[in-house]
Image (tube, helix red, strand yellow):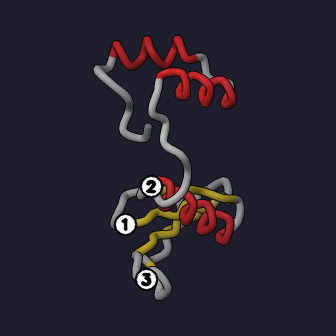
Amino acid sequence: MSTDTSPNDDPQSGRTITLTQADDGWWVARDEETGVASQGEKRQDALDNLDEAVALHKGEVGESIDTREQEEDVLEELGIDSDEVATARDEHDGLPEFM
């Protein structure tokens, strides 16, 4: 069971953010406009992580991956088998929404 807080309007960004505290004590922050969510052990951690996730979602930070070789390099750095990603992509007609 989780404890929900009411949506909060962020006066700096104009975004509506919903904060939820899970049974394990972690906080989940969700940007209502984009649907992007993140988490953290503390409220502020969840909000900081959400800021980064929304910026990535909007393309405001990070570098694009334009070639198969670049994708394989990034996956390798993350410890993800690129062959498994290719197999999953073939089985599901493309990448999942979060990628």
Q: CA distance from mark 1 to mark 2?
A: 18 Å
Q: Amino acid at mark 2?
A: Gly
CA neighbours of label 1 inside 10 A, class few (<14), some (14 to 19), many (20+): few
Q: Position of residue 86 (x, y in %)?
A: 45, 15
1 vs 2, front mark: 2
Residue 9, numbered label: 3
Left or right, residue 71 beside residue 15:
right
Q: Residue at x 54, y 57 (%)?
A: 61
**Outermost residue toward the left in this view:** 93
- Residues 84 and 45: in front is 84
Q: Position of residue 68 (x, y in %)?
A: 48, 22
* Helix, strand or loop at mark 2: loop
Q: Amino acid at mark 1?
A: Glu
In terms of image quadrants, where is residue 21?
A: bottom right
* Helix, strand or loop at mark 1: loop
Q: Residue at x 37, y 29 (%)?
A: 95
Q: CA distance from mark 1 to mark 3?
A: 10 Å
Going from the N terminus, do you reach mark 2 or mark 3 first? 3
Q: Residue at x 44, y 77 (%)?
A: 6
Q: Amino acid at mark 3?
A: Asp
CA neighbours of label 2 inside 10 A, class few (<14), some (14 to 19), many (20+): few
Residue 32, numbered label: 1
Q: Which residue is under mark 2? A: 59
Q: Is residue 1 visible?
A: no
Which image quarter holds the C terminus? top left
Number of numbered discs overlaid on the protein picture: 3
Q: CA distance from mark 2 to mark 3?
A: 22 Å
**Position above or below: 93 against 46:** above
